[in-house]
Image (cartoon, rainbow, N blue to C red):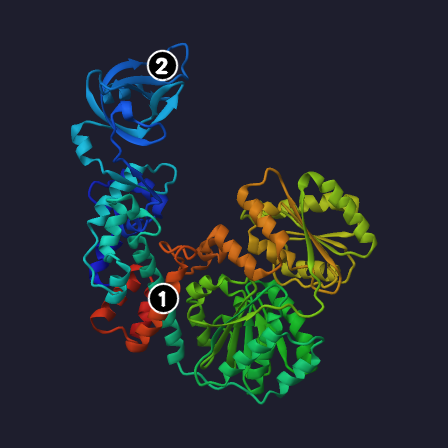
């Protein structure tokens, strides 16, 4: 259960004094529909306004933020014949004059706020316009009582439409008062050496800053909260790992005869990193602890072959293996790669997806349950309740980032002490590996198999589309096979399919009978038939949506055109480009963009032209977009970070990981005073799933 001391932080924001439903509703759009006090506290300022500069008008500098004591002298309302002209108010302090400028404002409001002859304090940015000092729409217009309440340093928050700085600022000020004095969960020596405040004081410094430095990303308060969040994440991952380890493993390693036969059957030599990865995995399988390993590699680095050799290792030991992919098209691509090799060494391989029905499905389920099938490939269907294995030893999960961290725990239910190997075709920067996969051992594939040709990547404006189509015509005469990827218009498959259909009609006019179309709205069997015709060379141009992003392998395809490339993320562009360059033919990738190009889009396309190194591309993607979008955490249920931007606070991550491991080594059940404090930390950052593992033992 969540510690009772934290309950005030998990209460609705409507319980905060002075925040009625009228304010709570727009704040819900900013913080989330069921916004809580904690959400207000963790919505940290993005900057500050320093209102300490209080000069006389004669000394006031244009371009500065100033707070001035003035007397209202003249009103110049909007002329009737010029309704778009501003309302002007002249004020003085005896040393000079300044004009306050208001556009589209209610006259009554101005007259009530600034009555002639009244003394007021005004705060805002000073500007020089036609030689006259002015302040357009002052931030603050205050009387003596209002001035007394004005903070000298005011935090500035990220907003959405309908939410003002005053709304979120007022909520934050009262929310800070709700923070209890929690026991310290950090090492006192770390807190002292870093000059970090307590958790409560860190929040107070950020929402009620006394100095401009208090709210900066490098401030002790920001570092403290970032470390708290990173430690909670690393502790959660370490608990998941400890839980997996406590469930004793089984040695699942044969004598190597099938693995050796498979290696002999391969039409290429394994790369050095493939060999290292296989050694790592076989080493894990030989231990009585359960394996939990991440295999990451670039496009075309040979992860599927490594997975097959790992699965063959457990089959040698008389047990079964399963490989789960996120989409049917990817599962069937794995089957296409694996089955010929498996057949060569008498391994029984089958596929189970939503497509198999009736008697065929029943027969397949019976063969899996009896142990007749050695290796089963499939989608989520593999882990449905009705699927039973005779003796599942190894679960391979492809495209791990699409499934979510805690779903790994569910895989164990299909067998006794199941070892887990997860794969990703999106190389992940080291900081994100530690953040999201810190409970795993990691093997990385850096080289591509021999014979792969570099891809010539070019950037071209959509204004030259006719030229692109003309060049395609010449390429087709030399035997080229082409992917044409249509723009990502929205999250709607229907709209994206419509764009693909229009491009298909256009290209079919130029190259009748040579063009095919595939998109996500089609049935699986229909997509397979179209892909098979393209792979066989019966059609030469395949127009597609991003349905071909992963798992499509046609070595003869040597040109890919990505239309509206500026709309795609770096990782997605890299995945799409990886559909070509898979054979020994020289390949080309054309990134077609529409002008004008935004700064970030231009940076993405430039990186794509410069490098094919997926690990470098992943680092650049992290820098440009941040970790949430890079790994799709918003969709997959991963525990994304709110306070700790891993690019800014990367140096804290390694320390948090080491501390989490050390803490659980010394105190695996998190008992005693500090253990209880650390449990509170887990709940505070909503790592309840990990906290429950402590109780589950």
84 left or right, relative to 140 = right
The answer to whether one can see residue 183 in this image is yes
The kind of secondary structure element at disc 1 is helix
What residue would you read off at disc 1? 655
Image x and y of residue 166, in percent? 28, 37
Judged from the image, the secondary structure of the residue bearing numbered disc 2 is loop
Q: Earlier in the sequence, mark 2 or mark 1?
A: 2
Label 2, on which residue?
Answer: 78
The quadrant the C terminus occupies is bottom left
Does 244 appear above or below 96? below
Residue 1 is at least partly visible in this image: no
Residue ID at (26%, 53%):
202
Percent from the top left, x then y, of residue 530? 71, 58
Which quadrant of the view contains residue 97? top left
- Structural distance between the alpha carbons of marks 2 and 1: 61 Å
Q: Is residue 267 above or below residue 618?
A: below
Q: Residues within 10 Å of mark 2 (few under 14, many from 20)?
A: some
Question: Which picture quadrant has residue 81?
Answer: top left
Query: Front-most of 128 and 498?
Result: 128
Percent coordinates x, y for residue 3 in the rendering: 22, 63
Quadrant of the image containing the N terminus: bottom left
């Amino acid at each position: 259960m969540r510690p009772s001391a934290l309950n005030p932080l998990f209460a609705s924001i409507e319980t905060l004094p002075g925040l009625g439903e009228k304010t709570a509703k727009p704040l819900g759009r900013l913080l989330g529909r069921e916004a809580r006090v904690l959400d207000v506290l963790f919505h940290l300022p993005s900057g500050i306004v320093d209102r300490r500069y209080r000069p006389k008008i004669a000394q006031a500098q244009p371009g500065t933020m100033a707070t001035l004591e003035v007397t209202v002298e003249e009103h110049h309302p909007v002329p009737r014949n010029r309704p778009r002209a501003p309302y002007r108010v002249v004020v003085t302090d005896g040393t000079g004059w300044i004009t306050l400028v208001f556009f589209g404002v209610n006259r009554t409001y101005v007259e009530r706020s600034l009555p002639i002859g009244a003394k007021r304090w005004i705060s805002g940015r000073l500007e020089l316009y036609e030689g006259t000092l002015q302040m357009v729409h002052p931030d603050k217009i205050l009387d003596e009582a209002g001035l007394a309440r004005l903070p000298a340093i005011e935090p500035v928050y990220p907003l959405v439409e309908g939410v003002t700085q005053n709304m979120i600022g007022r909520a934050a000020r009262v929310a800070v008062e709700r923070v209890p004095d929690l026991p310290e969960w950090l090492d006192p020596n770390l807190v002292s050496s870093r000059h970090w405040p307590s958790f409560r004081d860190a929040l107070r410094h950020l929402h009620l800053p006394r100095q401009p430095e208090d709210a900066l990303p490098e401030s002790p308060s920001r570092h403290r909260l970032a470390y708290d969040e990173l430690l909670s994440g690393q502790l959660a991952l370490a608990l998941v790992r400890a839980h997996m380890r406590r469930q004793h493993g089984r040695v699942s390693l044969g004598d190597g005869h099938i693995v050796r036969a498979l290696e002999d059957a391969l039409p290429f030599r394994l790369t050095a990193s493939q060999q290292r990865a296989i050694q790592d995995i076989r080493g894990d399988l030989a231990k009585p602890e359960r394996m939990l390993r991440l295999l990451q590699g670039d496009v075309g680095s040979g992860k599927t072959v490594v997975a097959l050799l790992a699965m063959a290792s457990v089959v040698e030991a008389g047990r079964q293996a399963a490989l789960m992919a996120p989409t049917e098209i990817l599962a069937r691509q794995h089957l296409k790669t694996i089955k010929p090799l498996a057949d060569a060494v008498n391994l029984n391989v089958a596929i189970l997806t939503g497509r198999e029905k009736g008697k065929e499905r029943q027969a397949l389920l019976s063969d899996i349950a009896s142990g007749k099938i050695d290796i089963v490939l499939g989608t989520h269907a593999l882990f449905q309740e009705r699927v039973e294995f005779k003796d599942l030893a190894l679960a391979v999960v492809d495209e791990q980032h699409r499934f979510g961290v805690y779903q790994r725990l569910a895989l164990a239910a299909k067998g006794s002490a199941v070892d887990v190997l997860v794969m990703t075709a999106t190389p992940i920067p080291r900081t994100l590996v530690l953040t999201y996969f810190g409970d795993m051992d990691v093997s990385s594939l850096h080289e591509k198999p021999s014979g792969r040709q570099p891809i010539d990547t070019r950037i071209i404006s959509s204004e030259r589309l006719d030229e692109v189509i003309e060049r395609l015509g010449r390429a087709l005469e030399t035997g080229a096979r082409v992917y044409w990827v249509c723009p990502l218009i929205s999250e709607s498959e229907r709209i994206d399919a419509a764009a693909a259909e229009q491009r298909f009609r256009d290209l079919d006019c130029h190259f009748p009978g040579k063009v095919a179309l595939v998109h996500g709205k089609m049935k699986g069997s229909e997509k397979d038939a179209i892909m098979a015709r393209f792979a066989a060379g019966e059609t030469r141009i395949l127009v597609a949506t991003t349905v071909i992003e992963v798992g499509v392998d046609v070595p003869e395809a040597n040109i890919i055109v990505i239309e509206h490339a500026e709309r795609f993320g770096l990782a997605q562009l890299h995945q799409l480009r990886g559909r070509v360059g898979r054979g020994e033919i020289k390949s080309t990738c054309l990134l077609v963009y529409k002008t004008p190009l935004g700064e970030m889009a231009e940076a993405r396309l430039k990186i794509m032209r410069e490098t094919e190194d997926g690990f470098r591309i992943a680092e650049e993607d992290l820098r440009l977009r941040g970790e949430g979008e890079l790994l799709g955490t918003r969709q997959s249920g991963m525990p994304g970070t709110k306070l700790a931007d891993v690019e800014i606070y990367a140096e804290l991550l390694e320390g948090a990981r080491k501390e989490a491991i050390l803490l659980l080594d010394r105190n695996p059940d998190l008992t005693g005073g500090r253990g209880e404090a650390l449990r509170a930390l887990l709940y505070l950052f909503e790592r309840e799933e990990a906290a429950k593992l402590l109780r589950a033992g």
